[in-house]
Image (tube, rainbow, N blue to C red):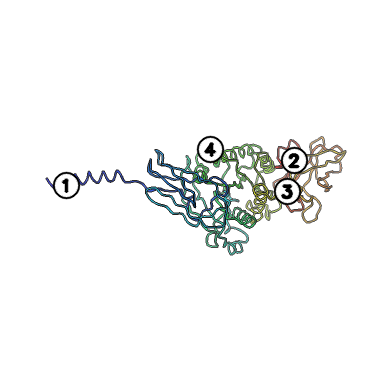
């Protein structure tokens, strides 16, 4: 009987102790050693603990405390900090103590999209060269795994890594080259978060998307609200054929991501490349939709019609200029490099001058030129019958004059308006003009 009583008492005591055991304070994967903290912006730090547990976060001289809510979630927001070239330590103390080391302060960008953004350094044309040169301790990489979720996920299985030849191979080539250019130009640390999935449409990346999948839920939500400077985006191949509907979806995507981050963060996209595998005339209307997205404030777009080495391959092999052209937009718009030419020519309007049409452009830079010094190509003109014919095009200052024999009363012009276009108009800085059509053009200029 005594043994039974002793056993019962010990069991009760065990239950009592077990009932008071508290869970360790935990952090999301994106808040970890080796991360880069976004300079000059408030810094949300969040995680989980027992409901009501007090949590204190310390970074240098800053200290912020809070209590976990009824669901065990907590968040503090540290004041903005400046880049100083030093390594920092952060401590998070609740029941337990977490120490995060080797933290840098600089610039943080998130890159997303489909296969051309996911395309890794290992898949690149010059992978050996890029890998050998990847010893870059001021560049930090965070590779979000491929995860779909029906509701916003709280966390992912990933870790921040110091960029090196050992780990750069699996990282997005476009995002890597973007980050390296920024780091070289700004001389501050750069953190890069890659959340891209080959073959994905735009819809699963939308905040409100309810259909099965949910790449926003599985890959973007878990890193929110980590402080960022902005987003880069390379997607659209899987939405070719939608025309201006894609512009509306871009609007939803950009506004949704900005809303959940609580700021009008910069958003720079890559216009998809010419490719022979689309249905007839399906690609140019999507180009127009991408240019139309430039009407959204704080956006930019890279044109890459000159970077295609094989129109039968949807994946251009050399991603370095894509990333570096994205960096031009950021350097000019986010970092005050006001004299930097960051865009190729974008269509503004036409003026009919007898049998000729004069086309004007934004972003002419130091002037217009034809790539390789050849005659301008891919210009077409139409008269009142709306039938397009190949046209002769000549540069006249910051405009292009277009005409064709047999078209005495021209009404419209278009440029590079086919799936496999190889147009050659660019500015003196070597940035190509986007394809366009003058009739009912919906595009923006991001001026």
| Label 1 crowd (10 A; few <14 / some 14-19 / many >=20) | few
Which of the numbered marks, if any, corresponds to residue 344? 3
Mark closest to the chain's N terminus, 1 or 2: 1
Residue carrying label 2: 437
Residue carrying label 4: 209
Mark closest to the chain's N terminus, 2 or 4: 4
Which of the numbered marks, if any, corresponds to residue 6? 1
Spatial CA distance of label 4 from label 3 is 34 Å
| Label 2 crowd (10 A; few <14 / some 14-19 / many >=20) | many
Front residue (pair 318, 241): 318
Rendering quarter of residue 130: bottom right
* Furthest-left residue in this view: 1
List x then y, in percent, for residue 118. Answer: 57, 52
Rendering quarter of residue 259: top right
Spatial CA distance of label 1 from label 2 is 88 Å
Badge 1 element: helix
2 and 3 marks in contact (CB < 8 Å)? no
| Label 4 crowd (10 A; few <14 / some 14-19 / many >=20) | some
Front residue (pair 385, 248): 248
Badge 4 element: loop
Callout in the foreground (1, 3): 1
Callout in the foreground (2, 3): 3
Front residue (pair 156, 179): 179
* Rendered view: 429 above or below 294: below
Task: Look at 78% across and 51% down and name the residue there.
Answer: 366
């Amino acid at each position: 009987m005594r043994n039974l009583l002793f056993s019962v008492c010990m069991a009760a005591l065990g239950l009592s102790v077990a009932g008071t055991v508290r869970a360790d304070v935990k952090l999301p994967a994106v808040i970890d050693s080796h991360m880069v903290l976004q300079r000059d912006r408030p810094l949300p730090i969040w995680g989980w603990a027992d409901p009501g547990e007090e949590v204190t976060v310390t970074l240098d001289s800053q200290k912020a405390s809070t209590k976990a809510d009824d669901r065990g979630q907590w968040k503090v927001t540290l004041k903005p900090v400046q880049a100083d070239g030093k390594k920092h330590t952060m401590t998070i103390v609740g029941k337990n103590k977490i120490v995060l080391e080797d933290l840098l302060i600089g610039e943080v960008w998130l890159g997303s999209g489909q296969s051309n953004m996911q395309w890794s350094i290992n898949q690149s044309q010059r992978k050996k060269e890029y890998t050998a040169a990847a010893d870059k301790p001021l560049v930090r990489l965070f590779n979000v795994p491929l995860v779909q979720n029906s509701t916003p996920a709280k966390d992912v299985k990933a870790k921040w890594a110091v960029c090196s030849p050992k780990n750069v191979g699996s990282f997005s080539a476009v995002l890597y080259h973007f980050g390296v250019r920024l780091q070289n130009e700004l001389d501050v640390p750069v953190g890069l978060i890659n959340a891209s999935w080959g073959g994905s449409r735009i819809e699963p990346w939308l905040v409100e998307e309810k259909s099965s999948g949910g790449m926003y839920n599985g890959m973007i939500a878990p890193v929110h609200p980590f402080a960022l400077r902005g987003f880069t985006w390379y997607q659209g191949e899987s939405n070719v054929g939608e025309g201006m509907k894609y512009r509306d979806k871009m609007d939803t995507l950009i506004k949704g991501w900005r809303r959940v981050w609580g700021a009008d963060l910069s958003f720079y996209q890559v216009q998809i490349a010419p490719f022979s595998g689309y249905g007839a005339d399906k690609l140019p209307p999507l180009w127009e939709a991408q240019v139309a997205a430039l009407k959204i404030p704080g956006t930019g777009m890279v044109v890459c019609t000159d970077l295609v080495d094989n129109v039968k391959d949807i994946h251009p092999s050399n991603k370095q200029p894509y990333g570096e052209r994205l960096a031009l937009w950021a350097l000019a718009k986010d970092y005050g490099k006001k004299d930097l030419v960051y865009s190729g020519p974008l269509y503004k309007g036409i003026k009919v001058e007898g049998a000729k049409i004069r086309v004007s452009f934004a972003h002419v830079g130091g002037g217009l030129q034809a790539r390789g010094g050849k005659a301008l190509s891919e210009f077409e003109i139409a008269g009142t019958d709306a039938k397009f014919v190949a046209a002769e095009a000549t540069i006249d200052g910051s405009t292009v004059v277009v005409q064709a024999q047999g078209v005495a009363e021209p009404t419209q012009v278009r440029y590079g308006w086919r799936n496999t276009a190889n147009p050659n108009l660019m500015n003196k800085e070597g940035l190509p003009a986007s394809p366009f059509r003058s009739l009912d053009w919906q595009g923006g200029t991001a001026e």
